[in-house]
Image (cartoon, helix red, strand yellow):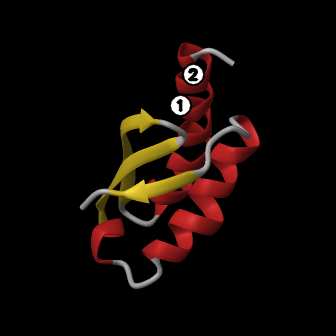
Amino acid sequence: MTTEETLENVEKALEEIRPFLMSDGGNIKLLSIEEGIVKVQLEGACTGCSVNQMTLKNGVEATIKKYAPQILEVINVA
């Protein structure tokens, strides 16, 4: 998979996740993809949410890996 295809697939995954985050007053922004690591920034209500790490790993990372299996990890950059 090319870098461009990976980027497109990660964006598709984020589009799938975004409505759930927005319904709770949050959002997510893609910062970069480097060597299989996706860096995102949780925004709005997500920044202070006590379960944001669980959301990041179980929701965001799982969905991104469904679209782009080559991704190793998703990291939130505060």
Quadrant where the N terminus is found in the figure:
top right
| Residue pictured at 57% horizontal, 22% vertical | 8
Residue 51 drawn above or below residue 14? below
Secondary structure category for the residue under label 1: helix
Q: Which residue is mark 2?
A: 8
**25 or 7, nearer to the observer:** 7
Which residue lies most toward the left here? Answer: 78
Left or right: 74 as drawn, with respect to 69: left
Residue lying at 43% horizontally and 36% vertically, measured from the top left: 34
Which amino acid lies under the numbered mark 2 shown in the image of this protein?
Glu
- Residue 25 is situated, as x and y percent measured from the top left of the image, at 36, 62
Contact (CB < 8 A) between labels 1 and 2?
A: yes
Q: Is residue 37 above or below residue 53?
A: above
Label 1, label 2: how many angstroms apart (C-alpha)?
Answer: 5 Å
Q: What secondary structure is found at the residue carrying circle 2?
A: helix
**Residue sitting at x 57%, y 49%:** 17
Where is residue 61 shown, x and y percent of the image? 60, 55
Q: Is residue 58 above or below residue 35?
A: below
74 on left or right of 76: right
Pointer 2: residues within 10 angstroms few (<14), some, or many (20+)?
A: some
User: Which residue is labeled 1 in the image?
Assistant: 11
Towards the viewer: 74 or 58: 74
> What type is the residue that disc 1 sits on?
Glu
Q: x and y percent of residue 31 in the render?
A: 33, 39
User: Where does the C terminus fall, quadrant-wise?
Assistant: bottom left
Count of marks placed on residues: 2
Point 64% across, 67% down: residue: 58
Would residue 21 be found to the left or right of residue 32 on screen?
Answer: right
